[in-house]
Amino acid sequence: MGTGLVIVAVAIGLNEVRRQRWHPRPVLIVLVVLLVVAFVPPMELRNRAQWRAEFGTFSATAAPPRVDLCGRRFYPDDETVTLTQAKDQEGRALGVVARTPAGTAILAKTSHAHVGDCILTLYVETAPDRYVVYELSGGP
């Protein structure tokens, strides 16, 4: 239902509430439901479309099949590491550069997390102290 139709429905519903002498609660409940149906799904659809574009999935619960960050695409490797192992591999300079749709951290070498610098490896958190290594697809 379009936003314009919802506004018209709300106006008609409020007018009916004013004209009637009965309790307005059922009409107001219907109006609130109409407003929620009109405005919440577009926001959810926008979020899901953004997840699909950036992470290759509509799911907000699993590790993504890919990560697009700073114009580069990263794919998961078979390797799973702990935070200590990831810091050892990257010289201890890891920081959160993004978050997955599920809200888990995406780590990268923080000295490379600036525009124009080249991030080669990402670490996506999949469980407490467990990170899947994501490698750059193609070259820098």
Image (tube, grey):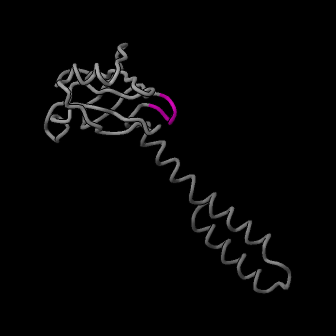
Q: Residue at coordinates 29% horizontally, 22% vertically from top-left? A: 84
| In this view, 90 is above or below 78 | below
| In this view, 17 is above or below 5 | below
Asked if the magenta segment contains residue 56, the reply would be no
Q: Position of residue 91 (x, y in %)?
A: 17, 24
Specify the quadrant that holds the N terminus: bottom right
- Name the one closer to the observer, 82 or 133: 82
Left or right position of 134 against 51: left
- Main SS of the magenta part reads loop
Q: Quadrant of residue 12?
A: bottom right
Q: Residue at coordinates 77% horizontally, 80% vertically from top-left? A: 16
Q: Residue at coordinates 22% horizontally, 20% vertically from top-left? A: 88
- Name the one closer to the observer, 127 or 61: 127
Residue that lies at the very extreme toward the right in this rendered image: 22
Left or right position of 56 against 44: left
Q: Quadrant of residue 83?
A: top left
Q: Position of residue 55 (x, y in %)?
A: 40, 33
> Which stretch did the figure color magenta?
57-62
Specify the quadrant that holds the C terminus: top left
Left or right position of 81 against 41: left
Q: Position of residue 5 (x, y in %)?
A: 63, 67
- Name the one closer to the observer, 122 or 52: 122
Q: Quadrant of residue 138?
A: top left
Q: Position of residue 21 (x, y in %)?
A: 85, 85
